[in-house]
Image (cartoon, grey):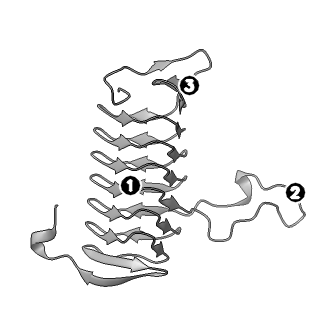
Amino acid sequence: MNNGKGKPVNRNGNGNALAGEHLSIAPNVRLGENVKLSKFINMYGCEIGDNTKIGAFVEIQKNAKVGKNCKISSHTFICEGVDIEDGVFIGHSVTFINDSYPRAVTGNGELQTEQDWVVERTVVKKGASIGSGSTILSNVVIGENAIVGAGSVVTKDVPANAIAAGNPARVFRYITEEQRIA
C-alpha cells in the first residue's frame, strides 16, 4: 500500500499507520494493493479494495467496505454499515447515514452507546456513481451502474441503470446499453 506518491505506509508507535502528514489509519484497516491516499484521511476498522483512490478529508468508519477500483472524492463520510462494491464513483462531500432515527441520549437521558441502536445498512452496487453533495439515507440500495445526480437526497432504492436526482431523489430515466460501463 502506498500514499499515492509511491511512498510506503509506516506504522508509528501508537499503532496508527501513517503515509505522510495528517493521515490516520487504524491498525485494523484492511487495505488492498495499490490504494492511493490523499492527506487528512481518517479510517478505522474498514476494508478498502485494490486500486482504490481516497481523496482528502474523507472518513471511513468501522464495518464499512469499499471495493476495488473505486474513487472516493474529498470530504466524503462513509459510516458503519455501508458496502460500496467495485468500480464505484463517489463525488465530493457525499454523506451516508446509518440510523433513521438518531438520538444522542436514551429514554432515561443517558448518552447512547453502541448497544442502544442498530446499524442500518446501505449498499452501492458495482459501477454506480453518486454526484457531489448527495446524502444517502440508510436502508437503501443504489443499483448497478445507477447514477445519482449531484445534491440528491436518496431516501429509497435506486434501480440498476437508473438516473435519479432531486430531494427526494426520483428516477428520471434509464441508461441506454451504449452508456453502460459494466
The picture places residue 129, in percent across and down from the top left corner, at: 32, 63
Task: State the residue at coordinates (39%, 78%).
Answer: 165
Figure check: 51 above or below 178: above
Q: Please state if 148 lies on the left or on the right of 18 as rendered.
A: left
The picture places residue 137, in percent across and down from the top left corner, at: 53, 69
- For mark 2, does the 10 Å Cα neighbourhood hold few (<14), some (14 to 19), or many (20 or more) residues? few
- Residue nearer the viewer, 170 or 182: 170
Label 1 is placed on what type of residue? Ile
Q: Nearer the viewer, mark 3 or mark 2?
A: 3
Q: Secondary structure at mark 1?
A: strand
The picture places residue 164, in percent across and down from the top left corner, at: 35, 78
Query: Which of the numbered marks, if any, corresponds to residue 84?
Result: 1
Task: State the residue at coordinates (55%, 46%).
Answer: 61
Task: State the residue at coordinates (39%, 48%).
Answer: 66
- Residue nearer the viewer, 53 or 133: 133
Instruction: Of the two numbered discs 1 and 3 on the same chain, state the one appearing first in sequence.
Output: 3
Q: CA distance from mark 1 to mark 2?
A: 33 Å
Instruction: Of the two numbered discs 3 and 2 on the same chain, state the one appearing first in sequence.
Output: 3
Do residues under tags 3 and 2 come within 8 Å of each other at their CB atoms?
A: no
Label 3 is placed on what type of residue? Asn
The picture places residue 111, in percent across and down from the top left corner, at: 83, 55
- For mark 3, does the 10 Å Cα neighbourhood hold few (<14), some (14 to 19), or many (20 or more) residues? some
Q: CA distance from mark 3 to mark 2?
A: 31 Å
In the image, farthest residue toward the left: 178
Q: Which residue is mark 2?
A: 110
Which quadrant of the figure has residue 89? bottom left
In the image, farthest residue toward the top: 13
Query: Which of the numbered marks, if any, corresponds to residue 16?
Result: 3
Q: CA distance from mark 1 to mark 3?
A: 24 Å
Instruction: Of the two numbered discs 1 and 2 on the same chain, state the one appearing first in sequence.
Output: 1
